[in-house]
Image (cartoon, grey):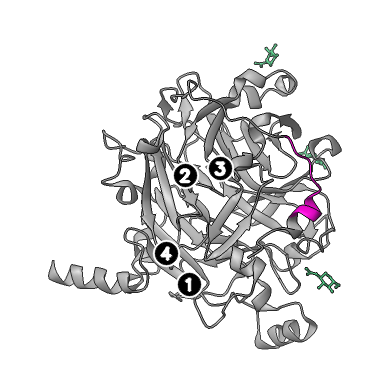
């Protein structure tokens, strides 16, 4: 017991987070090249400029931890990358482009990815990736390639689908940085949803139909009363940021999920049934199907959310350097929202949060406002990836399920995640490629509560130009 406590104490030194364990950290990102010569070439040609790289999204699938890096500045050799979890532990591992360097070629619209934000793996071993096709950051953005969904087979590391959004799916202001999946009872029965933050839309894509459509709603718009942000000692206004973090709930008794969403400039949570989103003919006729779920309370802007099959939702709390939680068995109101973990040093701008199939939570923090506004101090740690078992993260909070959640058999761990999370005990274990996840074991849950009695916030519709808007960003 004493030794255990000493070990915990050592781990805790690296970060102020209590439940989340810091697993990787970097002062500056770096990439893994096949040999020193090609890396030297990359430096010389400007293909690799490490100080221009900021990680934004993460996802874990078996022995890979994916990390996305948008091409906001030159010198990013891969926008979609991974860290091999079964390699010898390196606290600051070099990124490996996925599926390859060639598959990450800037401007190669048909074969390569140009800029990727958040990504999602599914139970059918597919990785869903939206290439937004942009190079640069406001005001110097070029749309090099069209918005294209790219889906990879993770077992063969090959792209199995590329789908270009229809012109009707996007508007001139479109900016999409989040994705959610709605997995049905078969692999074909999968829908993906994309939140258009600055164009105020929600795009649905059906794998089976290979077709997309776009919803509009006033709930996608920012709340004009909460556009002021204070993060990392910076004060700035993000007053036009609409629908951003999205996640699907477990399936309800009617067989459908709820898609939960929040605008970035908002403290309010909304939801819509996937029964509506899955039906293209609902596009013009679904105003009342969108629900107000409730409000989190002050200082609760969020960029990313994820919901577990137990009905617990986790989300970033960017003003509080924290990860928040909500148990969807309870009404959505401030008393039922908790901070699951917080760290004023390590969790500055928690950009993404994910829960993997072993119910391990992954969080990445990246000090994004400092990167965009001033300059990161590269003598300091700037990017961190944390992990924690979900049950441990919410234990003792109002989010803890009253009855312990028993995961269905498809959660059987096909990869030795414990050795990865405790590197000092690491054994070299490779995932079993013959283990396929069962597709027909999606658990059923009662429908979620909707706090529809909550007064609906009023919105001002604004359609300001995205470029001029972004110039006002992050003024000190
Ligand atoms: C935009 O690009 C121009 C020309 O390359 C450069 O002078 C300017 O500093 C850039 N502005 C920003 C905000 O990056
Ligand atoms: C899906 O649609 C895209 C159009 O963006 C097309 O290029 C592709 O071949 C289609 N794939 C399938 C499997 O139908
Ligand atoms: C889709 O929505 C339309 C219009 O509300 C409705 O008539 C139709 O039955 C729905 N389709 C399905 C498959 O639910």
Q: Which residue is mark 3?
A: 124
Q: Which residue is mark 4?
A: 344
Q: CA distance from mark 1 to mark 3?
A: 30 Å
Answer above or below: position of 28 versus 234: below
Tell me the magenta residue range. 461-469
The residue shown at (48%, 48%) is: 299
Ligand 3 falls in which quarter?
Answer: top right
Label 1 environment density (alpha carbons within 10 Å; few <14, some 14–19, many ≥20):
many
Alpha carbons under labels 1 and 4: distance apart: 16 Å
Q: Which mark is residue 25?
A: 1
Residue 8 lies, with reference to residue 437, above or below; the image says below
What is the CA distance from the residue labelled 3 to the residue labelled 2?
Answer: 39 Å
The answer to whether residue 192 is magenta is no
Q: Secondary structure at mark 4?
A: loop
Residues at discs 2 and 4 in contact (Cβ within 8 Å): no
For ligand 1, tell me if the residue under mark 4 lies within 8 Å.
Answer: no
List x then y, in percent, for residue 437.
48, 42
């Amino acid at each position: 017991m004493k030794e255990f406590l000493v070990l915990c104490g050592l781990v805790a030194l690296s970060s102020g987070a209590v439940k989340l364990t810091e697993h990787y950290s970097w002062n500056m990102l770096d990439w893994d090249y096949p040999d020193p010569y090609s890396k030297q070439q990359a430096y010389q040609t400007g293909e690799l400029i490490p100080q221009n790289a900021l990680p934004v999204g993460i996802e874990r699938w078996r022995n890979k931890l994916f990390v996305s890096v948008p091409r906001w500045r030159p010198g990013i050799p891969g926008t979609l990358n991974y860290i091999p979890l079964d390699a010898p532990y390196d606290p600051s591992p070099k990124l490996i482009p996925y599926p390859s360097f060639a598959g990450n070629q800037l401007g190669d619209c048909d074969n390569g990815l140009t800029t990727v934000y958040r990504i999602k793996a599914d139970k059918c071993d597919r990785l869903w990736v939206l290439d937004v096709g942009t190079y640069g950051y406001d005001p110097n953005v070029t749309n090099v390639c069209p918005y294209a969904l790219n889906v990879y087979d993770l077992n063969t590391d090959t792209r199995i689908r590329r789908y270009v959004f229809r012109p009707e799916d996007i508007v001139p202001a479109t900016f999409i940085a989040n994705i959610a999946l709605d997995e049905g009872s078969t692999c074909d029965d999968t829908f993906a949803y994309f939140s258009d933050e600055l164009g105020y839309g929600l795009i649905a894509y059906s794998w089976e139909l290979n077709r997309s459509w776009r919803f509009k709603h006033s709930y996608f718009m920012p709340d004009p009363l909460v556009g002021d942000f204070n993060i990392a000692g910076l004060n700035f206004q993000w007053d036009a940021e609409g629908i951003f973090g999205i996640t699907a709930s477990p399936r309800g008794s009617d067989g459908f999920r709820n898609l939960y969403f929040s605008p970035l400039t908002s403290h309010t949570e909304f939801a819509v049934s996937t029964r509506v989103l899955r039906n293209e003919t609902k596009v013009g006729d679904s105003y009342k199907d969108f629900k107000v779920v409730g409000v989190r309370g002050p200082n609760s802007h969020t960029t990313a959310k994820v919901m577990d099959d137990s009905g617990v939702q986790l989300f970033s709390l960017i003003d509080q350097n924290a990860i928040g939680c909500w148990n969807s068995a309870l009404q959505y109101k401030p008393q039922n929202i908790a901070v699951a973990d917080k760290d004023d040093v390590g969790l500055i701008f928690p950009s993404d949060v994910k829960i993997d199939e072993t119910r391990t939570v992954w969080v990445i923090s990246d000090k994004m406002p400092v990167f965009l506004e001033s300059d990161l101090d590269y003598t300091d740690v700037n990017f961190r990836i944390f992990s924690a078992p979900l049950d441990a993260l919410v234990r003792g909070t109002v989010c803890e399920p009253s009855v312990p959640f028993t995961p269905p058999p498809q959660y059987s761990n096909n990869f030795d995640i414990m050795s990865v999370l405790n590197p000092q005990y690491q054994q070299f274990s490779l995932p079993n490629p013959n283990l396929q996840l069962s597709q027909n074991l999606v658990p059923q849950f009662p429908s979620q509560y909707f706090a529809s009695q909550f007064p609906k916030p009023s919105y001002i519709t604004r359609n300001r130009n995205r470029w001029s808007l972004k110039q006002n960003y992050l003024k000190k």
